Amino acid sequence: MGGVKTPITGALALVFSVLSAEAVEFGKDVLPILKSHCFKCHRDGKEKGDFNLEPHRIKEHIGAGLQIVPGRANSGLFMKVIQSDDPENRMPPKGAGLGEKDVNILKLWITQGAEVGVEESATPEKEPLEGVWTNKSGKKIKASLLGVEQDKAILRMANGKIYKYPIASLDVESQRRVREFAEKKD
């Protein structure tokens, strides 16, 4: 009656049983994977294939017949391209692709219903401020200012990575722009 067990299926069963002990949360578990592997091409202002994975837009791609099919991790295009063995079709397009742990987290999230959560899916109050930011040493970086947390500017680099950069380390003009942005957000 039982199927043939191999070391691989046994290992996968163990991974899934450990992961499924707790529900996968979008903000805590899924969003960091998307930010580090997908936001370079699939975010606000850069929506390759009309596919935006920002928290306030991802729900547009979740549902029966869409890229992410809740409860059916292997049905939607999202997981098919992530798991593709074909380098021409695999996402992300460069490198070896996502690691097994990240793939399993995404699969479990989808299997558990692909819930995003109210706070994560809310539309942002304001668009990010695109620009070139200069530090006190004169080094310039092109990034989007997403917000301000205490004494740090939250910057999203062109590669999608997000950094908290000390405002005091920016030159006077960049500090002024950060402060103006923070005041407008309130």
Image (cartoon, grey):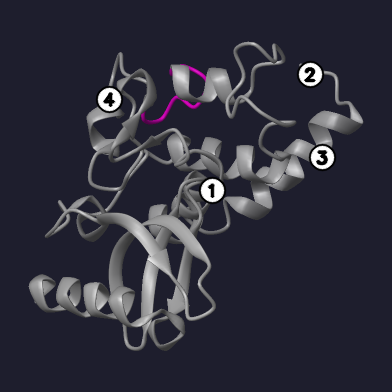
**Residue at the image point whose x is 46% and y is 84% from the top:** 169
Indicate the position of residue 178 as horizontal and vertical percent values.
26, 74
Indicate the position of residue 58 as horizontal and vertical percent values.
30, 37
| Mark 1 lies on residue | 33
Work out whether 184 lies above or below 53.
below
The residues colored magenta run: 70-76
Q: CA distance from mark 3 to mark 2?
A: 15 Å
Residue 3 disc label: 2
Q: Amino acid at mark 4?
A: Gly
**Residue at the image point whose x is 34% and y is 26% from the top:** 51
Q: Amino acid at mark 1?
A: Ile
Q: Earlier in the sequence, mark 4 or mark 2?
A: 2
Picture quarter with the N terminus: top right
Pick the residue in front: 50 or 141: 141
**Residue at the image point whose x is 78% and y is 21% from the top:** 2
Q: Amino acid at mark 2?
A: Gly
Q: Earlier in the sequence, mark 3 or mark 1?
A: 3
Q: Secondary structure at mark 2?
A: loop
Q: Amino acid at mark 3?
A: Ala
Indicate the position of residue 125 as horizontal and vertical percent values.
12, 60
| Mark 3 lies on residue | 11
